[in-house]
Structure formats: C-alpha cells, structure tokens
Image (cartoon, helix red, strand yellow):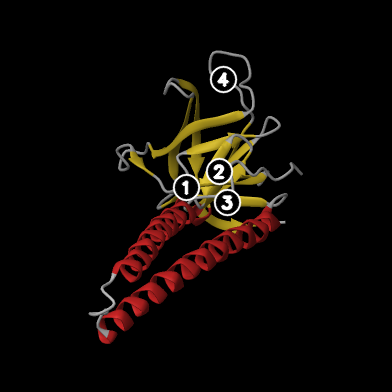
Amino acid sequence: MTAIAAAAPAANTATTAAGTAQTTLGSNYQTFLKLLMTQLQNQDPTSPLDTNQFTSQLVQYSSVEQQIATNSNLGQLIQLSQSSAMLQSSAIVGHQVSVQSSQLSLQNGQAGLSYTAAAAGPVTVTISDANGKVIDTANLTAAKGQNSWTWDGSRTNGGTSPDGAYGVTVTDTSSTGTGAALPFTVTGLATGVTQSNGTNTLQLGALGVPFSAITSVGK
C-alpha cells in the first residue's frame, strides 16, 4: 500500500475566499471604528450626535464584528470538513477499484478494464502513449454483455511499456458496429488520495481521477 499523499496545503479556494472576506471585513471594521471615535471626539458639545443615529451606528459596528467572527468560524469549519473528507477517502487506499476514465493505469506491469458489448463479435482495444501515439492494439472476440481484458504493457513493435497512465479506447469492429465506441471502466489498485483546491483525487498509480468517477470498490 502506498502512503497517502497530501499534495495541496490545507488552504483551498473556499477557505481563501473566506479569509479574503474576513480581511476585508476587518479593514472595514477598523475604519468604521476610527470614524466613530473621530466623530465622538469632534462633535459639538452643544449639539451632540442624535441618539437614534448614534445607536444605529453602534448596531452597524456590532454587525461587522459579528460577521468577522462568523467568517473566522466558517473558515475553521471548512478546514475541518476537508480534513475529515480526506481521512474518510483514505480508507479506499489499498483496494481494487473500477473507475470511468479515458486512461488506464499500468501498475507493476498490469492494467485492466471491463467493457460491455451489445452483441458477441470482434472488438478492438487501442492503447496510446501521452503523445497520442498508438503503442498497442488488441483484437478481441467479445461475448454479449460484460467482458474484461488485461494489458501487460507489451507494445505492438516489441518491448514493454513502463508503469504509468496510458490512453485507451474500446471499439466495436464488427460489420454492424462500424467502429462504435463501447462503454468501459478501468480497474486498478488505489494507491493514494491527493487534495487540490478543495477537491479530493484518487490515485491509481500514475492515474488520478475524481471520486465521482468511481464505479465500484473491491477488496
């Protein structure tokens, strides 16, 4: 099992926004306080500030103070929520998972996928590198329904691909299929969870996918 990676600092977009708002409120709060004190120091003793107006200003002052406290508490809650989500997500590490992705992850020389064929017939799986160059093609005979396939990293022109993320497509090459893409999911071992901008990403070796892409979790 690979250790969980915390790729991003705890501060994220939501927390940053709350912090910015708090800073702005704090600045307004201090400015308002200075204006209020200046007004009290320089008012005409023979014509003091109207009581209702003064009370209204104090209410505004109190409101800004409460907003600052609210923003501070909100920022703390966001950070706690993200930390909790990160810990919960880490429970999946070390398990086999199936995810929806246009890439598969070659891990320890193995990568797998499952696809669904509407009818029995020929199917072609195409593997490409990071530059989109086709490096391997597998011509399969699919059964109707769910099918699985495993890639060992071999290349069409010889040699073996190193572990990493590779593009993959599955197409129906039957006479009636006319090269139509077939739905598929890729399988692999969950090796870590990273967090960036408030979003948790599941790592399958070199492949990172959002948690919303997970379709199943195995043992």
Residue type highlighted by circle 2: Leu
Q: Do residues under tags 4 and 1 come within 8 Å of each other at their CB atoms?
A: no
**Nearer the observer, 176 or 187:** 187
Residue tagged 1: 184
State the SS at label 4. loop
State the SS at label 3. strand
Q: Disc 2 or 1, which lies upstream in sequence?
A: 2
Residue type highlighted by circle 1: Phe
Q: Is residue 218 visible?
A: no
Residue 117 left/right relative to 80: left
Q: Residues within 10 Å of mark 4 (few under 14, many from 20)?
A: some
What residue is rendered at 53% in x and 62% in y? 78
Q: Disc 2 or 4, which lies upstream in sequence?
A: 2
What residue is rendered at 67% in x and 34% in y? 107
Residue 88 left/right relative to 143: right
Q: Do residues under tags 2 and 1 come within 8 Å of each other at their CB atoms?
A: yes
Mark identifier at residue 98 = 3
What residue is rendered at 57% in x and 63% in y? 76
